[in-house]
Image: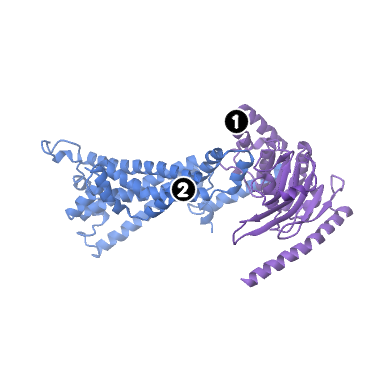
Chain colours: A blue, B purple
Amino acid sequence: MSTDISISKRSNGRSETEGGRRIGLPVSAKRLLPERVHDMLVQTGWTLLSVGLFAGIWEFCWAVGLADPKLLPPPHIFLGDFAEQAKFFNTATRWSIGVNPADGPSPFEAVLITIGATTMRVLVGLLIASVLAISLGVAIRYYVAVERLTLPTITLLSPVSPIAWLPVAIFLFGIGNAPAIFMVVIALFFHMVLATINQIDGVNRNLINVARTMGATKAQTYWRVIVPAILPGLLVVLRLNLFGAWMVVLVAESTGVGYGLGQVIMLARNTFNPSLVFFTIALIGLLGFFSDWLLRLIQKRVLYWVPQTAGVLRGL
Amino acid sequence: MASSSKMKPFSSQDAVVCRGVGKVWAEGTARAHEALRDIDLDIKPGEFVVLLGPSGCGKSTLLYLVAGLERETAGEIWSFHERVEQPSPNRSLIFQETSLFPWLTVWQNVAFGLSIRGTALDERREIAHEALARVGLSEAMHKRPDELSGGMRQRVAVARALAMRPKVLLMDEPFAALDVQTRQKMQDFLLDVWRDSGASVLFVTHHIDEAVALSDRVVVFTSRPGRIKKIVTNDLPRPRDPFAPASEALRRELTSLLRDEVDRAFAEQEGLSTGA
């Protein structure tokens, strides 16, 4: 009995993986490299091709004179002279009174410090927002009183653009890291609460009923069934909101935070320097891309039980 | 409460007793509809009772009421001296679709109820191992649910129910999603488990063959609202031959009992669709 079932299962599994590996090198080349390395190379190849295509079109427009290099400098211009761009990434102290302009970090270090500062604001903001939002979302479903007291206000505030919170951030926190982090938190918090509630409502009722028939209390049902069941969805919510955080942090930083990528963009705007704008955009793109990749990696590790369906869709 | 004085007497030793049970969903609203009416049913300890009826007749609703997951809106349900008011580990429910926790391994799934109770880890593992051995899956202990076939998953669900040593096993079309061959094997397997455990089984299905193969008694339901149309005793000797003339006769009897109800349900649905 057990054998015939397991055989049918195994053949099922095989056909699924075959469906998932449609795109790639021909079968003969496949066996030369370990499967994981091969997959990673293929994926990197496609990423480079995708970006290269975009850059290529841009360069072409420049070459035929469609794109004015003073307004839309193509990648080879704004990426070409790193030192020229990096000198705008000042980390404030060098130009302060009493500080020798030659002191302080080199331009390269300044770029790293700027990137680090912005990344820190994004991650701290994301962390605070998700802890607060998930706790409140669970509490809203757990206690009816919490729902009645908070949900209307949250729904009311969630369509407010983060821009509207900018003055509030400055009134409350002045300038520096705090208002930037506040902006990230406030921009993500309301949506994440609503997303958490949505995830809880989507939990398979059978799983909850199983726990109940086994004598689980309400608290046990929440901790041992609902929380693990909503984790996959929450991680997706987190990934989507990560991009939101990257967007908001620039707005927040443009108000004066000492240093940050948003401040560089503002500088570029005020000094009419499109190259610097595109250079910074490229940096932000890379950062967003890698932080998403990191979260996806975490997703795969932590949520080992979630099936990967992308391969099935590709087979269509 | 007025009805309880007129209630048919019952033995408090019985595994499940229903007296005048009714269920109206969304009672008191415009969407209210009656799922069950006037169910009187006594299930003896160790008895295998099949609830048979057209889909949507309320037989699953009755199972949820007996499990204590939903409350009846009329009548009373009792199980071994106790009024059923909430879920209890004494009455395990097995669902049609997979209800294993995907983030736990097979043995952790089986031991879930025990860990809720606070049983020690060693004992949990031992009981899980024993329960899995009884369903023939001790090798799969450390696998994850998504590595198993549908039939194996349902056997794990049965093992999880058994680990709680329930007195009543409630099964809601547990084999409906399986292919015909697997389903037959699962029926044989269920009968073995049932004989070993001594539990009563309340088994919902709309398959007449399944009712003939498994039951001590078959409760045939009418379509909406679900009422008991007839209780048919099935005393065919086990192991049962599905092709024996007696099986054939029982199948024919159940088919004719059901046909009217299916016709009625169809007519009702057609009325609904043309009305809309």
Q: Nearer the viewer, residue A80 or B40?
A: B40
Chain for mark 1? B
Q: CB atoms at circles 2 and 1 under 8 Å apart?
A: no
In this picture, is B272 found above or below B132?
below
Amino acid type, callout 1: Gly
Name the secondary structure under disc 1: loop
Where, by quadrant of the figure, is residue A56 drawn? bottom left
Quadrant of image for the C terminus of chain A: bottom right
How far is mark 2 from mark 1, CA to CA? 31 Å
Q: Who's the residue at 63% across and 30% down the image?
A: B125
Q: Position of residue A7 (x, y in %)?
A: 67, 45
Q: Residue furthest right?
A: B245
Horizontal arrangement in the rendering, residue A6 relative to residue A120 (left or right): right
- Is residue A131 visible in the rendered image? The answer is yes
Residue name at image x 18 percent, y 45 percent: A87
Residue at mark 2: A147
* Mark 1: few/some/many CA within 10 Å (<14, 14-19, 20+): few
User: SS class of the residue under badge 2?
Assistant: helix
Q: Nearer the viewer, residue A272 or B190?
A: B190
Q: Residue B15: x and y, percent?
A: 76, 41
| Numbered mark located on residue B118 in the image | 1
Going by the numbered disc 2, the residue's amino acid type is: Glu
Relative placement, left or right, of A86 versus B124 is left
Asked if marks 2 and 1 fall on the same chain, the answer is no
Left or right, A168 with respect to B135, comes to: left
Task: Check the picture and name the quadrant holding the N terminus of chain A.
Answer: top right
Q: Spot the residue most to the bottom.
A: B274
Q: Residues within 10 Å of mark 2 (few under 14, many from 20)?
A: some
Horizontal arrangement in the rendering, residue A22 relative to residue B207 (left or right): left
